[in-house]
Image: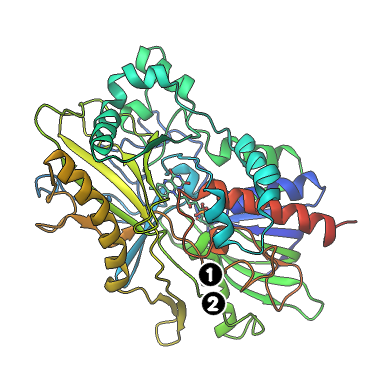
Amino acid sequence: AAVDNAPAIVVGSGYGGAVAALRLGQAGVRTVVLEMGRLWNTAGPDGKVFCATSAPDQRSMWFRSRTEAPLASFLWLDLVNKDITPYPGVLDRVHYDNMSVYVGRGVGGGSLVNGGMAVTPPAAYFAEQFPTVDAAEMYGTYFPRARAMLGVNTVDPAWFESTDWYRFTRTSRKAATAAGLKTTFVPNVYDFGYMQREAAGTATRSALAAEVIYGNNQGKRSLDKTYLAAALGTGNVTLHTLEKVRAVTRAADGSYLLTADRIDLTGAVVETKQYSCASLFLGGGSLGTTELLVRARDTGTLPDLDASVGAGWGTNGNTMLARANHVWDTVGADQSTMPVMGIDDWANADNPVFAEIAPLPIGFETWVSLYLAITKNPERARFTWDSASKTVKLGWSAAQSAVSVAMAKKLFDRINAANATIYRYDLFGSPSKVFADDFCYHPLGGCVLGRATDGYGRVKGYKRLYVTDGSLVPGSIGVNPFVTITALAERTMARVLAEDLAP
Ligand code: FDA
């Protein structure tokens, strides 16, 4: 097959890939972006690009015959999941032993499916996780740059206090306050001006129509509308969709050779393509990038990769749980899908937890307060190559999840005690399961900065091979991760363009 040649290739179009593509394009470097998901810009038969959460169809999930929503049940009934036709849908759930990981698929990666919470970590914890990174430069330059490009904004506090759409958040705040806990507003990339127009009935509803995990048809500043639009606007960036990179090797002249499978909408491989590039930027996310590199090292196509490639993986301590409120503490039938507040107990050295107050937008009063807790779980796992099955495995154990659960339980036991409330037992599938300990939204690590790479994401053992995504973060960042991933990618690109790719 003919080899498609480009000075630079970016694998993946999530946060890390999008930053790389824009900064390369602006620097005049002709760049090809390879993304395994589709471009979400065409309306389906219902006139919408993304399907409704309440009526998921083939667009919802990545090649499934039944949806696998995070909340599998309500009152133990499987009301949530639906049979669908296999298709390159926007949300994937990747199954490993003892842990399933949700990720976005498509141009924009996780930005298409996530809750938009745009949180900058506390400086002290950032410095603890990244001791070799100049924190002053991050907080002075790269975090502000990332937030500006991502379109971060905050909810109007007066509107927040008065609208029915955030009653669920106010009810959770009241319960936290009663336990002496601090709550804090968190910024988001969803356009809050647009959301207020949705509430007023003057704009088509998206966050106020239960849209989020299967994509938002309006209002959200996902990467296809920010970084990636700007990248394509440079005229130097080309995007190839439905192409999955499955192998990387290096040619004698030092260039990289990639093999990618192009699939059609049924998932059939219709073409195997060869690419070559002088500089390769990996933005496939914690799972995608780490899998490519572990496979390359252990099958011998990039044998000089460091032994630490594959290590340092964590869930950001993710645990989902819910509480049952008293009948007089309603959460409302109307709930915005975009979280705007967290319970911030991260400074509690005995039990650091940051818990996002999450919506349960199912259209009727549930009395449920739902949370995604981010705990300071120190457990880490490693990805390994399994030559028998020719797949990459993750060595995460149930005992490692139990550490997150214990930390979340300690915090929410306090809240329940102060309010004389209990947990909900009916939301996560099996009877009496209170804590969702078998999935996460925040996969981090696998190619950790300063271990598998140098201090700027240059992969050890190889020249002009870079990692720009969540695999650089050592398993935990204490808050929702995409602002940190974006800011680190900005820092890497500034350094690499100045030192490695300067004309
Ligand atoms: P990301 O996963 O975004 O992008 C990787 C891209 O590469 C994908 O598009 C993938 O298809 C593609 N790819 C992978 N392997 C490939 C290959 N071999 N060939 C070609 N393409 C390949 N975070 C946050 O900060 N605030 C929030 O509110 C939330 N909420 C949230 C909700 C849900 C439901 C999920 C699933 C996740 C979140 N997150 C979040 C997490 C956040 O979305 C996540 O941390 C980032 O998207 C990670 O960015 P990356 O650039 O690392 O990879």
Identify which residue is drawn at 49% across, 71% down.
312
Q: Position of residue 127 (x, y in %)?
A: 59, 57
Q: Position of residue 466 (x, y in %)?
A: 68, 65
Q: Is residue 93 left or right of residue 236?
A: left
Q: Is mark 1 within 8 Å of ligand 1?
A: no
Q: Position of residue 336 (x, y in %)?
A: 33, 29
**Cβ atoms at labels 2 and 1 below 8 Å apart:** yes
Q: Secondary structure at mark 2?
A: helix
Identify which residue is drawn at 21% across, 48% down.
414
For label 2, the residue is: 294
- The answer to which of 306 and 49 lies nearer the viewer is 306
Q: Is residue 365 left or right of residue 144?
A: left
Res. 402 image quadrant: bottom left
For label 1, the residue is: 290
Question: From the viewer's perspective, is residue 78 above or below residue 97?
Answer: above
Q: Residues within 10 Å of mark 2 (few under 14, many from 20)?
A: many
Asked if one can make out residue 488 in the rendered structure from this viewpoint, the answer is yes
Q: Residues within 10 Å of mark 1 (few under 14, many from 20)?
A: many
Asked if one can make out residue 82 in the rendered structure from this viewpoint, the answer is no
- The dot on residue 491 is none
Identify which amino acid the numbered label 2 is placed on.
Val
Q: Quadrant of the N terminus?
A: bottom right
- Of all residues, the one furthest to the right in this rendering is 503
- The answer to which of 183 and 67 lies nearer the viewer is 183
Q: Is residue 135 left or right of residue 375?
A: right
Cα–Cα gap, marks 2 and 1: 6 Å
Question: From the viewer's perspective, is residue 68 above or below residue 294?
Answer: above
Q: Position of residue 102 (x, y in %)?
A: 38, 55
